Image: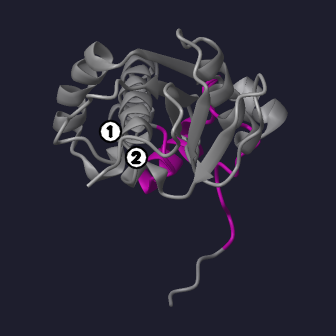
């Protein structure tokens, strides 16, 4: 059972990101402040939910949240500042656009940098423990999937509609065959050429 709050602050926001391990596309973050009477039985860590359920939960979260924000950070920024810093920056940008301003932040994972002197806690596997982080994980994932579906139309040969930019065998074969696009992260190892041992 996911908990509503981590702190005793009234405006606690949860934040999470999606797409950190992808070879193409943005890293997408979301931040959400939920009301004290928030209940949503199906809500869980977005990785535990089917695409159909995530799409069903998205409008409910948006309607019930006191405030929410979603930001994409492009591959150029990821390549410039690295994926960890880009993930944190995307989450920070979401938090600064929330209205009302949160008085406490809970972050999925173990790394964050302070923003606007707001106190925060990092929580490993926070998206399976706290409703606001789970809500943020659903928004980040659904918005990023929509983005990847859109750019799939521009470059269908990479099948981003299916792999969402993750390093699948199919995606890597397409990179080998067609080269890279403006959506690929050039700082990532797009084609590992070393031999894999059969263990």
- Image coordinates of residue 48 in percent, x first then y, are 28, 53
Residue at the disc numbered 2? 130
- 126 within the magenta span: no
Q: Are marks 1 and 2 in contact (CB under 8 Å)?
A: no
- Image coordinates of residue 12 in percent, x first then y, are 51, 31
Q: Residue furthest bottom?
A: 199
Q: Which residues are magenta?
A: 165-194
Residue 25 found in image quarter? top right
Residue 4 found in image quarter? top left
Q: Is residue 161 left or right of residue 9?
A: left
Tell me the residue at 59%/77% (across/down): 196
**First in sequence: mark 1 or mark 2?**
2
Q: Is residue 158 left or right of residue 111?
A: left
Instruction: Give me the disc on residue 162.
Output: 1
Q: Nearer the viewer, residue 48 or 190?
A: 48
Q: Is residue 193 above or below residue 106?
A: below
Q: Nearer the viewer, residue 167 or 28?
A: 28
Tell me the residue at 64%/53% (across/down): 191
Q: Nearer the viewer, residue 89 or 67?
A: 67
The local crowd at label 1, few if under 14, some if 14 to 19, many if 20 or more residues have their Cα within 10 Å, is some
Q: Can you say which quadrant of the picture contains the N terminus?
A: bottom left
- Image coordinates of residue 87 in percent, x first then y, are 66, 36
- Image coordinates of residue 157 in percent, x first then y, are 42, 32
Q: Nearer the viewer, residue 167 or 80?
A: 80
The local crowd at label 2, few if under 14, some if 14 to 19, many if 20 or more residues have their Cα within 10 Å, is many
> Nearer the viewer's eye, disc 1 or disc 2?
2
Q: Is residue 157 left or right of residue 91?
A: left
| Secondary structure beneath label 2 | loop
Tell me the residue at 66%/20% (across/down): 93
Tell me the residue at 78%/40% (across/down): 82
| Secondary structure beneath label 1 | helix
Q: Residue furthest front?
A: 8
């Amino acid at each position: 059972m996911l908990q509503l709050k981590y702190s005793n602050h009234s405006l606690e926001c949860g934040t999470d990101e999606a797409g950190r391990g992808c070879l193409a596309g943005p890293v997408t973050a979301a931040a959400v402040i939920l009301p004290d009477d928030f209940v949503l039985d199906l809500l869980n860590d977005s990785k535990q939910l089917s695409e159909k359920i995530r799409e069903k939960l998205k409008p409910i979260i948006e309607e019930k949240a006191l405030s929410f924000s979603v930001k994409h950070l492009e591959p150029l920024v990821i390549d410039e500042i690295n994926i960890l810093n880009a993930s944190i920056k995307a989450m920070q940008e979401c938090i600064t656009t929330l209205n009302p301003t949160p008085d406490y932040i809970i972050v999925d994972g173990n790394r964050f940098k302070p923003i606007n002197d707001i106190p925060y806690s990092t929580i490993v596997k926070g998206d399976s423990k706290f409703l606001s982080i789970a809500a943020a994980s659903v928004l980040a994932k659904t918005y990023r999937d929509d983005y990847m579906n859109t750019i799939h139309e521009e470059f269908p040969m990479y099948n981003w509609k299916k792999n969402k930019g993750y390093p699948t065998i199919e995606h890597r074969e397409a990179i080998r065959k067609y080269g890279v696009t403006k959506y690929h992260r050039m700082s990532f190892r797009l084609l590992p050429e070393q031999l894999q041992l059969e263990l």
